[in-house]
Image (tube, rainbow, N blue to C red):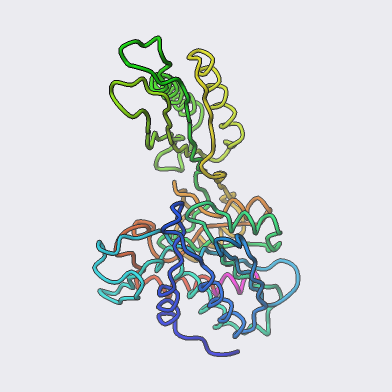
Amino acid sequence: MAALPSIKQQMSTLIALPSISSTLPEYDLSNEAVIHQLANWCESVGFKVDIQCVNKERKKYNLLASIGSGPGGLILSGHTDTVPCNENRWNSDPFTLTEKDNRLYGLGSCDMKGFFTLALAAVTAMDTNKLKAPIFILATSDEETSMAGARALASLGIPKARAAIIGEPTGLRPINMHKGIMMESVKITGQAGHSSNPDLGNNAMEAMHSVISELMDYRGELQTKYSHAGFSVPTPTLNLGCIHGGDNPNRICGQCELHYDLRFIPGMQMSQLRQGIATRLQKVAKSTGTQIEGNSLFNGVEAFATDKNSELVKLAEELSGYGAEAVAFATEAPFFSAQNIDTIVMGAGSIDQAHQPDEFMALDQIDPMVGYIKQMINHYCM
């Protein structure tokens, strides 16, 4: 088995390869260079690699690397993209790994390019000639925007491993549940006209007032019906994020658009939620005589829950010393659990540092996470 660069050297290389994903085309970048670098490292230590094109036009790719054979095995999975960054708000270059105060700073250090370096360190510390089941390293694209990489993996067939670790930054704590998320839009088309005579038009903003009332009523219904004490915010949430409409105070507003998100707990389904919203929008359209169009800003992510008594959860709790927890942020975990793979979210670093200027991974979390991965490989693959 070839020797890889050190964890710090690997992380430095990955961070220096920008792979921002953004809904705004001017910020969006390919992740191809990161995927090829990971593929080269994986191949050099004996993995078979398969690079999958997710979006040819935007040059987005997934990597599926495997070592060992047989049924079962362990998946180590993460995303290769990062969010955009405001470089002027950083105290160091976000694309240069900077070590300071026992921390490794850089865009993607914890969220989550750093995880791949820890996974490779764990694998190369094992005698892979003794594997009785395979190890898979999966690297995806566009997690920060559309989950397109994970959706592509699911459509092509995620390896039928016994267990999967999604290495998002959790402070080394096992996460067995998270909320689902929908991001939706409501577009209302009325009729513009001179504001001196309301009969000359049909005010889309006034109709939006009714839509907002319906959404807030629906939120109240959901919060009355659904609750889970495992979450710090135990009920579903619906946030009215941004609204745009009209063009002048002396014109009747002819068009208005609202964007909102809905975060829901396990046991709730996106299809049912969207139907509930559609019913309410239809009612407003009929009562106001406007055209109302509801759309999804992206396909959404289902809520995630793994049984707290599952083999993987119990093993992660034993190794880490922490009980499994629930978090509000979404991950790629539901795509794995939907394939009946025992799945947790667990990694070094903190979500509090993710998406922030001066993102970092604490040095004292690196060795413990490498150790946990090694012991999980031993459990599932040796």
User: Residue 9, position in %: x, y?
Assistant: 42, 82
Please give the name of the residue rendered at 55% of the width and 55% of the height, measured from the top-left corner: 332
Indicate yes or no whether the magenta region holds residue 375. Answer: yes
Q: Magenta stretch: dominant SS?
A: helix
Q: Which residues are magenta?
A: 374-380
Seen as rendered, the residue at the extreme right is 70
Between 218 and 305, which is closer to the camera in this rendering? 218
Image: 299 above or below 52: above
Is residue 373 visible in the rendered image? The answer is yes
Please give the name of the residue rendered at 29% of the width and 21% of the height, measured from the top-left corner: 250
Between 206 and 111, which is closer to the camera in this rendering? 206
Name the quadrant containing residue 172. bottom left
Indicate yes or no whether the magenta region holds residue 370. Answer: no
Between 24 and 134, which is closer to the camera in this rendering? 24
User: Residue 45, position in %: x, y?
Assistant: 60, 84
Name the quadrant containing residue 124. bottom right
Image: 87 above or below 24: below
Q: Which quarter of the figure is the C terminus placed in?
A: bottom right
- Give left or right: position of 26 versus 164: left
Please give the name of the residue rendered at 37% of the width and 33% of the height, measured from the top-left corner: 244
Name the quadrant containing residue 321. bottom left
Total of numbered circles in the picture? 0
User: Residue 29, position in %: x, y?
Assistant: 47, 63
- Give left or right: position of 19 versus 152: left
Please give the name of the residue rendered at 55% of the width and 57% of the height, measured from the top-left corner: 344
Seen as rendered, the residue at the extreme bottom is 2
Is residue 382 visible in the rendered image? The answer is no
